[in-house]
Amino acid sequence: MSLTLLIIGAGGIGGYYAARLLSAGHEVVLTARGEHLKAIQGRGLRVDYEGGQFHHPVKAYNHEDLVRAFYPDHFDLVLIALKSTATESVMDELAGWLETGAVPVLSLQNGVDNELLIADVIGTQRVLGGLAVRIGGHIVAPGVVTAEGVAQIVMGAWPYVAPDDDPRTTLLQRLEQAFCDAGIPSIVSADIRRELWRKLVINNGVNPLSALTGLDTRTLTHHPELSRIVYGMMAETVQSAKADGVNLVRKDLDEMFDLISNFNAIKTSMLVDREKGRPLELDSISGAVLRRCRVLGIEAPYTATVHTLLSLAG
């Protein structure tokens, strides 16, 4: 059975998943802005993925036109694939529209605070947490996205396992099957908050340092000195998770370090944002770690140093 999905944000992540879902026969509506939106509306969405290409006509809108064209419950799911720097403002912008429906919202964003911001607007019972694993993706020209990696989705009822009669349980099972059938490896997690923190371990390890140095992930993780900083920032993230009641251990740390060390050599999203002069997700990544370390009364010297240097670099 096909799904009807709204994907808010047609960048590297949202654009890639949209292309996969469109190819599988699902109805997808995108939001975008500026020249990227105009190009999608005029020529469709093109996604270059590891030597192959998807090219689809797709309905695309800015947010103002979206709320005039659709009711929230036209969709089975709203999927947010925006930078975490935009979560609060977009939820404020769409709050009145979302409150007129009951459609669940899935976040596929960096950080561990997006779901809380979404829940503040629509209530916890409609929130799904999620993460995109081993994917790199960027807009390379208006209407054109490039992506690479396995591009797995891990998702779950946020912040805890839903009871059997929670409608999110049925929807998650349906999404898992539909995504897998569309070529998107997907699993449902019973503890999505833990999975979000495990990804933050990677993001804090490489994103700020890559933006500061201009180096890709493979160079960072294989450099004799910089790899120690990566590992140190990841270890500080493991410790900070305890402030949210998430108990990560050395095994989690080592698994995440091995994962990013053996992934493709990619430019992190934070490095691309810095090169393009866009706002950085610094507060959502290293900032989230530092805030929780302060709550716990512990030091995070690696993260604090890189965060400060990057903040001063502008």
Image (cartoon, rainbow, N blue to C red):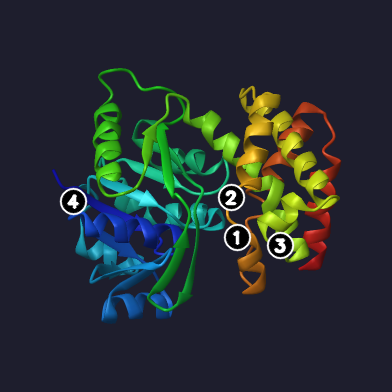
From what the image shows, is residue 248 above or below residue 57? above
Q: Foreground mark, 1 or 4?
A: 1
Residue 263's mark?
2
The residue under the point 51% across, 52% down is 88
> Taking 118 as reference, is 78 left or right?
left
- Total marks shown come to 4
Q: Amino acid at mark 4?
A: His
Query: Quick one: SS at disc 1?
Result: loop
The first of marks 1 and 3 along the sequence is 3
Query: Quick one: SS at disc 4?
Result: helix
Residue 74's mark?
4
Q: Is residue 302 visible?
A: yes
Q: Which residue is more in the foreground, 252 or 159? A: 252
Q: Foreground mark, 4 or 2?
A: 2
The first of marks 1 and 4 along the sequence is 4
Q: Amino acid at mark 2?
A: Phe
Q: Amino acid at mark 1?
A: Ile
Labels 2 and 1 touching (C-beta < 8 A)? yes
Answer with the quarter of the image where residue 90 lies: bottom left
Q: Foreground mark, 1 or 3?
A: 1
Q: Considering the image in quadrants, where does the C terminus appear?
A: bottom right
